[in-house]
Amino acid sequence: MGESEGDRIGMLLTLANLPKHPESVPVNALVPVEGTPLEEQPKVSVWEMVRMIATARIMMPKAMVRLSAGRVRMNLEEQALCFMAGANSIFAGDKLLTTPNPEYVADEEMFQILNLKPRPAHKGEVKFEQIPS
C-alpha cells in the first residue's frame, strides 16, 4: 500500500515487543483492485515479502507467519521462497475479504511439489486475551 521499509520494520518491532507475541502474523502483498485509490500500486517484490517473513520468523519464532493476501499474484517459485524464509501458514479458500485466493487444487499441487503437509483448518471457539495496559 506504499508503505516504506521503515514502516514494515516498525510494525514488526511493535508486534515483537508486545507482552505476548501474536499467534498469527499475516504478511500481505497488496492486490490492486480496479476503481480503488491503490489500483495502480506496483506489485510488491518477492524479495520484500521474503525479508518480511524471515524477519517475522526470527523475531516471533512461535507465531504462525501467514502468507496472506497477494498469493494469487505469486508463482510457485515465489511462494516456495516465502515458505523457505519461514512462512508456515496460508489463508486458503475462495476469497480473502475482497480478493480471490489461489484455487484449492493449485494449493494442493503446490503442497505436493514442495512436500508440505497441510494441517486441518482450525475450527473452534475463538478466545481473546486482553493485553494489560
Image (cartoon, helix red, strand yellow):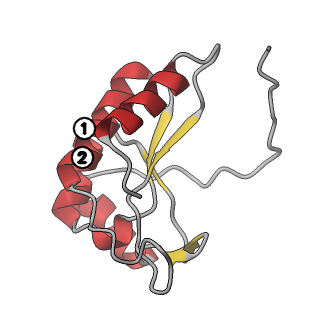
Q: Is the residue 14 above or below the residue 116 in the image? A: above
What residue appears at the point 54 percent right and 26 percent down from the top-left corner?
A: 15
Farthest residue in the front direction? Answer: 37
What residue appears at the point 58 percent right and 53 percent down from the top-left corner?
A: 120
Residue 100, image x, y percentages: 48, 77
Nearer to me, 10 or 72: 10
Figure quadrant of residue 98: bottom right
What residue appears at the point 37 percent right and 30 percent down from the top-left corner?
A: 9
Q: Quadrant of the N terminus?
A: bottom left
Check whether the beta carbons of the residues at disc 1 and disc 2 lie within 8 A of each other: yes
Residue 64, image x, y percentages: 50, 37
Nearer to me, 54 or 32: 32
Q: Amino acid at mark 2?
A: Glu
Residue 61 at least partly seen: no
Residue 39 at least partly seen: yes
Q: Is the residue 13 above or below the residue 80 in the image? A: above
In the image, 58: left or right of 66?
Answer: left
The mark tally for this picture is: 2
Q: Quadrant of the C terminus?
A: top right
Q: What kind of element bears circle 2? A: helix
Q: Amino acid at mark 1?
A: Arg
Q: Which mark is residue 67?
A: none
Figure quadrant of residue 77: bottom left
Using the numbered discs, state the Cα–Cα distance from disc 1 to disc 2 in whole angstroms. 5 Å
Q: Which residue is mark 2?
A: 48
Q: Which residue is mark 1?
A: 51
